[in-house]
Every structure is written in structure tokens, then in C-alpha cells.
Image: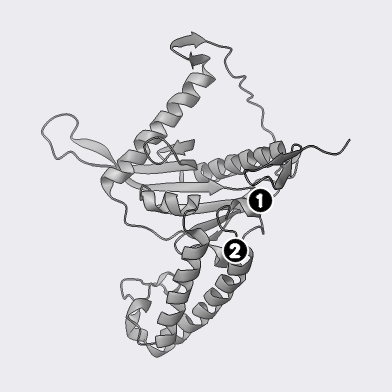
Amino acid sequence: MPEQLFFDLDFSPVKSVKEVPQRRDHRQAIQRAVLRWLEAADQPTGIAADVITRISRLRADVAAFWSAPARNPHNEGPPRIMQPTRTLIVQCHAERDECWPDCIRSAEILPQLKAHKAELAQVQETIRQEEPHLRDNNSLFEEFAEWRYENSTNTHYHSLKRAIDKLEHALYHGSKFERIRQAQVADYLYLAVPAGLVEPSELADGWGLLWVEPDLTVREMAKAEARDCLPDNRLHLIQNLAAACRDHTLLAHGVSRQKSEVVFVRPLVRRRGIESPRLDA
């Protein structure tokens, strides 16, 4: 008997029934790898999976936030309170076609985008040599220096930037990546994929890239650029993160809402033994 196929709305065959659970399992393994990486590398104040970024839709695969103690400006309560300092979102994908599901021209656009970004890097090197006054003097170390390329007199640089913006708009407009960016609830945005699946030059500007190895170790291939996130927007994501933690806490302790009734169910089995999961398992 031929293998059963799923069909999308235009009735073209897509993934087989055997491949869909495997894709879901791989995505969950990537989420797991990212959660461990974040906890080990930077120990967030709060972290959760499947966090809503808007009011009722568009979930982030992983979200985290960091807080720091600050003086309480009011005369009530503790003299120092915890204030959020930054938020982060990571989108996890197991296959390449998941990264650009809304762009039918991705196979044509991605090579152009990669070539333009490689050329842009060369032009930026020329600018650093010919216009050293554009360097931000606040950086003590060269590898961390920031450059005001937007103020350069190099016309080729500006034409390349315009071309890249047009290609990125064609590639990402309407995609989940773009809608999450437009939500403006995270200071840092990352894409996490199996190692080698996506190159840093293929990302929209500002996104960071994490490669997940078969043993679920994580390599940061491109650092995310900091975005201007308003305090209230951070608080919005943090409240949704807390709501996601509520759901996981109830499930872990055997409490479930079923329609209009809240009932006891069998708690999740807690496996405390150390294991060595793999992405290719």
C-alpha cells in the first residue's frame, strides 16, 4: 500500500504521516536544547516554552526574561524591587522549509541575499579603513566596537543596504518571524535550527542564530542585535510567560481544566535520572 500523504489547501502533497511526528519530535528536542543552553549560559529570571506574544495568538517557542533589583520609587512596600532588564525570544525549527513558509520565492531570493550580505561585509571593511571617525569611541576593544555605517559617504554601501532591505521584505513579509519582530516585546530575537541548516547570512537583520548539534549542544553562530523594547512591552511578554508557566505547573501537578470544570488528573511522571538525548534519534 502506498504511504499516506497529507494535503494542504491547494491539494498539493506535503509531508507523509511518518514525517510529521518526527518533525514535531525534532522541534521539541531543539526547544529542550535551547532551554538548557539558556539556563546554563545566562540563568534567566524566568523562562517558558510556547509563550503567546500578542493577546491570544502567535506563540514564541521559547521566551525568557532577566530582572535586576532597583530602588523602589514609591514609599510603599520593599525599598528595592525586581525590575525587568531584558527579554528574549527563540524560534525553533527542525527543517529548512519551516523557516520561510510564506515565501514561495525563497529558493530564488536566499542566494541573492547571501551574496549581497557578503559584499556588504567587504564594503564595511573598506569603510572602517577609509572612515575611522565613524567608530564608536565608547568601545575599548576592537572586536566589540560599533560603527555608524549609516553615516558613511560610501554610496555603494547605501545601495547595498537598500537592496538587502527589499530582499528581506520579499522574503520575510507576513512570515511568523516578521510578525514576532513587529510585536516588539523582546530585546533579542533568535532562530534555533539543526547545525548547518541555515547560515547567518540568510537571517533577517538583527536576528541571532543558534545551531543545535546532534547531541543537543548549542553553538551561537550569530549574536542577536539589541532592539529598543519598551518597559510595558517587556511586561506584556513576562505576563504571558507567567501564564505559560501556570499551564505547565497545573499539568505537572495533575490539575486540568476540562470545559467548565477543573479536575484532578494523573500527574506527569518525573524522571530524575540524567540522560543523553540526541536530535537525530
Foreground residue among 217 and 268:
268
**Looking at this rendering, what residue extends furthest in the front direction?**
10
Q: Amino acid at mark 1?
A: Glu
Task: Kindly identify which numbered label has been placed on residue 95.
Answer: 1
Residue drawn where x is 39% and y is 72% of the image: 145
Q: Is residue 250 above or below residue 175?
A: above
Taking the image as shown, residue 129 lies to the left or right of residue 1, namely left
Residue 87 location (% of width, % of height) = 38, 47
Q: Is residue 38 visible?
A: yes
Q: Residue at x 43, y 81 (%)?
A: 159
Q: Quadrant of the N terminus?
A: top right
> Answer yes or no: do the residues labelled 2 and 1 have beta carbons within 8 Å?
no
Q: Residue furthest left?
A: 75
Across and down, in percent, residue 277 comes to 70, 38
User: Which is nearer the eye, 37 or 161?
Assistant: 161
Q: Residue beneath label 2, please?
A: 105
* Residue 50 x %, y %: 50, 36
**Of discs 2 and 1, which sits in the foreground?**
2
Position above or below: 15 against 171: above
